[in-house]
Image (tube, rainbow, N blue to C red):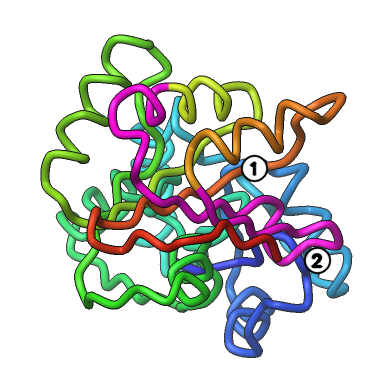
Amino acid sequence: MVATPIGNLGDITLRALETLKEVDLIACEDTRHTQKLLTHYDIHKRLIATHAHNELASAQGIIQMLSEGLNIAFVSDAGTPGISDPGSRLVQEVRQAGFPIIPIPGPSALSALVSVAALSKKSFFFEGFLSPKASRRKQRLAALLATKEAFVVYESPFRILKLLKDLEELESSRRLLMGREMTKMHQEYVEGSAATLLQLLGQRESVKGEFSLLIYPPDAEKEDDNYS
């Protein structure tokens, strides 16, 4: 299980590159996306698609190839497989078939955001992507806020405004840290209330990029919004 960059291709580890060069083939979430990474590093391998819609079926083919003595790497489109990305079903099936699974750690949007959040408490909760259905999303947000702990969610540019509006309605005093396009050229980190972030994004012609959002515990309020 090989972690790959979440944006900046320079973030890939030496061990990840060595692994991708040494394996017999690479299973990946999107062959086109992975091919760009491999081309950048002049790596030439056979690719097989293993994504959310075919992961279970693809796992059986991978197990067959493992039984034939092949070494296989799996990568998701960005970051660490299995963390709000495909990979968990593959791991389960391969492990049950008796083959070893080795993590090749590296980039993760979760750890990247937390590293610049200045959390005063050690614990936080990782939720990942919430339901696209409004009622389920809001219900889950209410449950997460009720824990009074910090938590992290991921969101697409198509639903980030809806998520922020839900947070403003449910608990407007909570502080947030928004990471957008992390590690990329136009990366952005903004700390403030849901209302502040809504105002900022609402002023733009369009909302672009993938978002990671950390919601601080209620005792982490600060006096002024801080843009960086």
Q: Which residue is mark 1?
A: 210
| Chain-order first, disc 2 or disc 1 | 2
* Magenta extent: 166-192
Q: Is residue 70 left or right of residue 14?
A: left
Which residue does the image show at 22% across and 51% down from the upper left? Answer: 92
Q: Nearer the viewer, residue 118 or 218?
A: 218
Q: Nearer the viewer, residue 100 or 87?
A: 87
Q: Secondary structure at mark 1?
A: loop
Quarter of the image for residue 188 reads bottom right
Q: Nearer the viewer, residue 93 or 223?
A: 223
Residue 41 on the magenta segment: no
Counting from the top left corner in percent of width and height, residue 55 is at: 40, 36
Counting from the top left corner in percent of width and height, residue 20 is at: 64, 74
Q: Which residue is mark 2?
A: 44
Q: Is residue 66 left or right of residue 191?
A: left
Which residue does the image show at 44% across and 32% down from the upper left? Answer: 52
